[in-house]
Amino acid sequence: MEKRGGNEVRAFLEARGLRREIYPFGESPHNSELAAKQLGVEVGATSPVALPAGIPLYQDLSLRRFETIYPAAG
């Protein structure tokens, strides 16, 4: 599978009219616990966004209770 980057994620979000802020990491945090620690937030692991076509993506609607979520994008 090809590596997806910030430009693809930005385009994906803009095409859907979603507010976006991309927080790049200097070094990949490798898991949701390390990413949450770097962001200073609780762990609420979510699926990646902007996946290549044909890969199913499911959203847990209970995520709507959060004002902000941080999906993986790399």
Image (cartoon, rainbow, N blue to C red):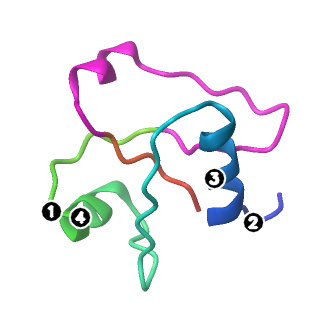
Read off the residue under disc 2.
3
CB atoms at circles 4 and 3 under 8 Å apart? Answer: no
Name which residue type carries label 2: Lys
CB atoms at circles 3 and 1 under 8 Å apart? Answer: no
Q: Quadrant of residue 21?
A: bottom left
Q: Quadrant of the C terminus?
A: bottom right
Read off the residue under disc 4.
39
Q: Earlier in the sequence, mark 3 or mark 1?
A: 3
**Residue interval drawn in magenta:** 47-68
CB atoms at circles 4 and 1 under 8 Å apart? Answer: yes
Residues packed near mark 3 inside 10 Å, few (<14), some (14 to 19) or many (20 plus): many
Q: Secondary structure at mark 1?
A: loop
Q: Which x, y percent locates residue 62?
A: 30, 16
Q: Earlier in the sequence, mark 4 or mark 2?
A: 2
Instruction: Please report the residue visible at 69 percent of the width from the left and 36 percent of the height from the top.
Output: 15
C-alpha distance separating marks 4 and 3: 18 Å
